[in-house]
Image: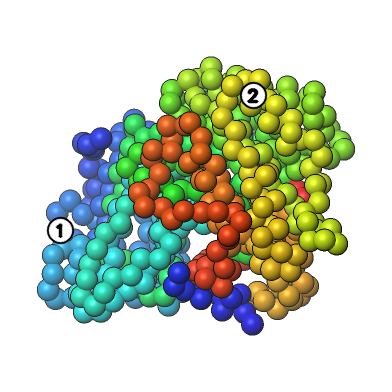
Amino acid sequence: MNYQGLINLKRLPFFTGLLILVFGAEFRVSAQEMVHYKFDFGTDKAKRGWQAVSENDLFDHEKGYGFEEVQDLESVRRKKGKASKNGFIQSASPFYFSANVPEGNYRVKVTFGDLKGNSGNVVRAESRRMMIDDFDTKDGEVSSREFMVNVRHPEIQGKAKQVSLKEREKDYLHWDKKLTLEFNGDSPKVCAVEITQVEDAITVFLAGNSTVVDQANEPWAAWGQMFPFFFDSDRVAIANHAESGESLLAFKREGRLEKILSLMKAGDYLFIEFTHNDQKPGGNYLEPFTTYKEELKHYIQEAKSKGGIPVLVTSMYRRNFDKEGKIVNTLGDYPEAMRQVAGEENVALIDLNAMSKVLFEALGPDYSKNAFVHFPAGTFEGQREDFADNTHFSTYGAFELANCVIEGLKRSNLDLKYYLKAHLSDYSPAKPRRFEDFYWPLSRRISMQKPDGN
């Protein structure tokens, strides 16, 4: 059974921007200009104020926009219908559209549909950040959806330095100075894309390790890349700076905390989740009730100095069961040490550690494999050995953990909870959703390499 078959069992401030489209010329902006791009897909000629995008528009930095690949794309044009709705781009496989943009937050409006047919759409941003999970249009319907995307560059503002990226990060879609959208789903049909820079969004920064990061490749995933899906597209942007293999000390040493602080404004949030790599012997080791607590307090103080709101998130359990089907604690005293810091510093705590125990035990020793990267050899192209990873998550597992974090947010006193999407389903880690009902069509990028950290 292939992985696609396993996870596609459906169905479960006013802005005045500077329009900078120069037809036939370069498509670039300086960091000082506000960005407002309007792309009309599936046409060679667009209405005034829009940039026409056909199936042959391959991205290059001089032009400043285009598709990452064009070989599978098809432009479809309808004779009748309003401009930006009378044609679309489609493909039988996921396709990626990018635009050069300055660092910042962007409201993205995507128009889907077909005046003579239906469509089924999924949208992810940058490195597989979940934005639209499953949006269908009926026969003849054309409709739009919006979401917020954070774009970051490696350079640290105000400093002659940049984040010390690991070699593998240089190929990720979230450090490349572009805003990239992945269009996926049963039958994606994209009519138009509008990208508008937003200055006053609340930015939620995530600091953490491989259990939080935007995992770039299938079948790996983490809760941070699912997080944007849950928030109001008008007000909140998720800036996930987590990276695989990171500890509190390494994150700081590599300039990642400094990068966050250079961007943070009053009212922004910093979610902090570290433990898995801090507990390991070596240069990054921290003792739970002394140096680990000291470093957490340093992060908290730094965020507060910028007017930010720190939030501590205890780390989830690894998949390690005893003979009675109960989860074994492999994280030692670190979660308790973080709980103590939350009390001592009077900051919010989301106890993902406690919720993950409930979740994994509810799933049970065997079924919980679905929440982790456990797949037999041959599930993915080029996979010669079984995957049996009890630390890193499948997309299903990452989504369930993200729901746990959201549930913790709902229970908190943080104002951020008022910016969650309306009508989110109630969630209990004691009653997780079924893996068979989780819909996640595969992205193009697949890796056999396990993420750093354990």
Q: Quadrant of residue 396?
A: bottom right
- Residue 208 is tagged as none
Residue 52 located left or right of residue 183? left
**Dot 2 amino acid type:** Gly
Residue closest to the eye, 361 or 175: 361
Left or right, 343 with respect to 407, comes to: right
Q: Nearer the viewer, mark 1 or mark 2?
A: 2
**Residue 83 placed where, x, y %?**
15, 63
Task: Report the coloring of the rendering.
Answer: rainbow
Q: Nearer the viewer, residue 246 or 278?
A: 278
Q: Which residue is mark 1?
A: 47
Vertical position of residue 356 compared to residue 397: above or below: above
Q: CA distance from mark 1 to mark 2?
A: 58 Å
Q: Residue furthest bottom?
A: 1
Q: Quadrant of residue 390?
A: bottom right
Q: Amino acid type of disc 1?
A: Lys
User: N-terminal of the two: label 1 or label 2?
Assistant: 1
Local secondary structure at mark 1: loop
- Which residue is pictured at 14% across the width and 76% down the height? 79
Residue 343: give its label. 2
Vertical position of residue 44 compared to residue 308: above or below: below
From the top left corner, tell me how far across and down residue 367 is, in percent: 69, 68
Residue visible at 58% across and 68% down in the picture? 435
How packed mark 1 is, by other alpha carbons closer than 10 Å (few <14, some 14-19, many 20 or more), is few
Q: Is residue 442 left or right of residue 245?
A: left
Image position of 116 with respect to 328: above or below: below
Callout 2 secondary element: helix
The residue sitting at 59% across, 76% down in the picture is 6
Asked if residue 26 shows in the view, the reply is no
Residue 36, position as x, y percentages in the image: 27, 44
Say which of 51 and 270 sits in front.
270
